[in-house]
Image (spheres, grey):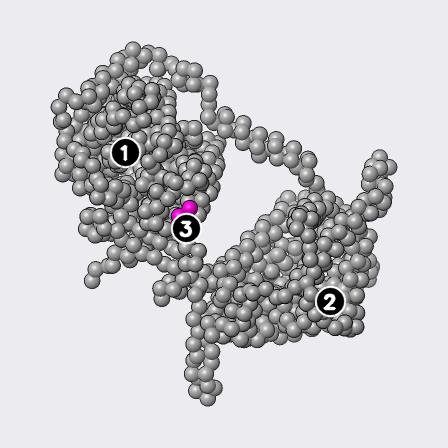
Amino acid sequence: MTMPYETILIVVLVLPFAGSCLAAFLQSNARNAEAWLAGAISLICLMLLVVSYPHIVNGGVIRHTVEWVPELGLNFYLRMDGFAWVLAALIASIGFLVVLYARYYLSPQDPVPRFFSFLLAFMGAMLGIVLSGNLIQLVFFWELTSLFSFLLIGYWYQTAQARDGARMALIVTSAGGFCLFAGILILGHIVGSYDLDRVLASGDKIRAHSFYIPALVLILLGALTKSAQFPFHFWLPQAMAAPTPVSAYLHSATMVKGGVFLLVRLWPALGGTNEWLWLVGSAGLISFILGAFIALFQQDMKGLLAYSTISHLGLITLLIGLDSPLAQVAAIFHLMNHATFKASLFMAAGIIDHETGTRDLRRLSGLRRFMPITATLAMVAAAAMAGVPLLNGFLSKEMFFAQTIETHDNSLLDQALPYIVTMASMFTVAYSLRFIAEVFFGPPPRELSRTPHEPPFLMRFPVGLLVLACLLVGIVPGLTIGPLLRTALHAVLGDAIPTYSLAIWHGLTPEFLMSLVAISGGVAIYLTFRSYLLVAEGPPLLRYIQGQRIFDRVLVAVSWQFARRLEELLGTRRLQPQLQLLFCAALLVGLAPMFAHGIEFGGEARTSFDVAFALIWAIGCACALAAAYQGKFHRFAALIFVGGAGLVTCVSFVWLAAPDLALTQLVVETVTTVLLLLGLRWLPKRIEKFPAADPPERDSSWRRFRDIGIATAFGAGLGALAYAVMTRAEPDSIARFFVENAYALGGGTNIVNVILVDFRAFDTFGEITVLGIVALTVYALLRRFRPAAESISVPEQQHSQDLYDEAQPTREKGDTLRSAMTIPRLMMALLFPVICTTAIFLLLRGHDLPGGGFVAGITMAVAFILQYVARGTTWTEEHLRILPVHWMGAGLLITACVGAAAWLFERPFLSSSFSYLEVPWIGSIPLASALLFDIGVFALVVGATVLMLIAIAHQTVRSHRTPSSRASAASPTAEVG
């Protein structure tokens, strides 16, 4: 039985992520198992791609769509044509070789599971980029590559270079990703869709639109930062602090190819203009020249290869910018060739570093005597990088030279382009020759930490296989790479593929002469400056312009100096001034349209005046005013008044026939009041008298009038707006749709709950995710929180009780408190199963009657809160295994799985279904998939609420410890996971 091609796409994308999760849980000493797992996944992906090749070889496209939000054009869309197939095959094949190489490169002391987990996740993200048929989806995977590259570059996080390089790569590439996202949004606005097929077919419409240039600039910022092109090239050399397998994979064959892949992919839609020619071509030309020149003066092997990568990617970018079909042919051809010879060179450099203990070119020489096989392989790969005949780099370099000779816009730069690129190619030959001569020739090396020798065969095997590919492509290109190249070209150029030749000899053509001049000139440059290169500390003039230093200064200026000044201007450590700024800003935003367009009250009939309802609201207003007044003088009283205002709101919901809102308000008010009450214990005491040297604080009358004015204006404005809305005719809204279809489409009669778990389930999914993040943040912050000095001591009432107990010979400390809590403790223990049962009851009835997962979750949390109040933190955590993080994780997993299950039935994400189950003696029982979603909401709300409770409760345990005991004893070990 053969696997459908659409299924192959899903498996190829999902398998690396699944393997990443599995690798993360393997034991740290399971080195072989992890390598076998990663290698098997890479090989399976490659084999599946090979199986699918016959379907796309003649211009076919494999597509698979899973509806997500089809009304907004947001679908999970996988699309593989010939160009995507070639990139996916490179990602999988070189990934397999890197895994094999990393098995022998990494030390047994390294956290190997983490390495292979990150590597597989990165492979999945790269496959997601090349297989995405939706541009929003592409941006998502684009940012994932930035994240996982950050983790891989910082793998050896104990070194400052790895941390700095990872941080720089993340900031630069993720900032470019934000620009790309903005550009894609503009592009989707122009086309009316984010579907890649529609975007590629709308080139004329895009180029004629007034938003073309903003979209182009933003998309180029994303592509150029990812491919380390000028002026964003500086992050790539700093990323060489990563392990060499990471450099060989990310920075030669995959991640840095993401930018040029995107440029080629969007060329039919964005190319064909002078803006494209000058922006893309200029960035590529400068990168090509700059990278080659700086590479020549590097003393670190990986530094040389990093700048050579910038140069070769600049070559590809320049070809894309030249904006002709033949230039795209040369760009794709060199993209494929560069992946093979550069990955092999990075691996060879890693072998040399692994076996000698250094990458310094000044300390290496004569290694061909000690490592003859490795030396031969590295020299062939370096020759391919230099563009020596009979190697793959020579063929694509000749295509490149041929395209620079052509006329593009007949400008002065266009006329001088052949001479410029020939000179830059001389530097390419020169640094390639320097790599060969200074590492493998000359006298034997001295003062090395290790004796050089050949690596294990399987560590050298990936290098040999890639070098063999360089030779075969260079000698018989038509038989080896020709079919693959034509398959990729058919996907980019369609049927308009220009005539090109992969012959290794075209006669004495201008481009061949340019190659000879470049090779001879490069040899001459190296021989002339050989002695200077051994002592040079960076390139002349450019050594003083260090990208890392500029980046650090900009980062400090933005994230520290500017932020600090902004904080001094607008920020404050007090809550009241922050609220003033917030309310004033909201007031101005609300008043602006009123002054501009005025405000008119409608003529709808007013409801009759109800004395009882008005009295309830009068009580609520009195509670609110009292809370505001007591907030400064008596916090406990203020909390009581706030609770009173909340109860009035709850009664108002009941009065206005909104039982779901009333129930939610009631349980939320209860829980927040208890949590705030627990938190009051740790707030610093109120300052009774301000120092005499602080006159603004001493004279507070003007501040009170100011605050009253702001509050009155804000309240009056909001009241006027509400009154204007309520006195107008009810607008045509979607409320009628919910009322008419709650049961027909959602299978429930509780319209509010059906909206939350069915019609607006995606919103609810996002909200509970945010709730979980907030709970984790609160827990993390309070774990580091230490109360004010005046709040550490035991409360006065408890202190008096302890003194009484200690004075009595028949009593122990705490007996008074325990005896006083005997009856409340018994009552709360008896209430625990009752409240839990009530919570389950509210959960199960929520789809048809007031209730639901959120209310049930808060109610369940109340049961746990009562146990903490009655029994204390230590007893409760010893007798109840709550594990709130597990609850939260299970809740998110359940809701996500319920949403994804709809895909199995070819329905959009979170589509629901309902039916009836016939039960003997009972009859028909309604069943809805939304109930499972509600269970997930219930679990997450329970976990999030209890986690915040635990964070506050642990302050009680900590507060009774002296500083010395805190240093020696472990912190409370509640199981939060």
Q: Residue 324: which disc? A: 1
- If you read the primary sequence from the N terminus, does the residue marked by circle 1 or circle 2 appear first? 1
Residue receiving disc 3: 192
Q: Is residue 112 visible in this depiction of the protein? A: no
Residue at the location (14% across, 31% down)? 503
Snapshot quadrant of residue 680: bottom right
Q: Residue 648: which disc? A: 2
Q: CA distance from mark 1 to mark 2?
A: 72 Å
> Answer yes or no: do the residues labelled 3 and 1 have beta carbons within 8 Å?
no
Q: Disc 1 on helix, strand or loop?
A: loop
Question: Neighbour class for label 3 at 10 Å: few (<14), some, many (≥20)?
Answer: some
Which residue appears farthest toward the bottom when viewing the image?
921
**Vertical comparison of 334 with 704: above or below:** above
Question: Neighbour class for label 2 at 10 Å: few (<14), some, many (≥20)?
Answer: many
Q: In this picture, which residue range is highlighted in magenta?
A: 190-194
- If you read the primary sequence from the N terminus, does the residue marked by circle 3 or circle 2 appear first? 3
Kind of residue at badge 1: Ser
**Vertical comparison of 952 with 834: above or below:** above
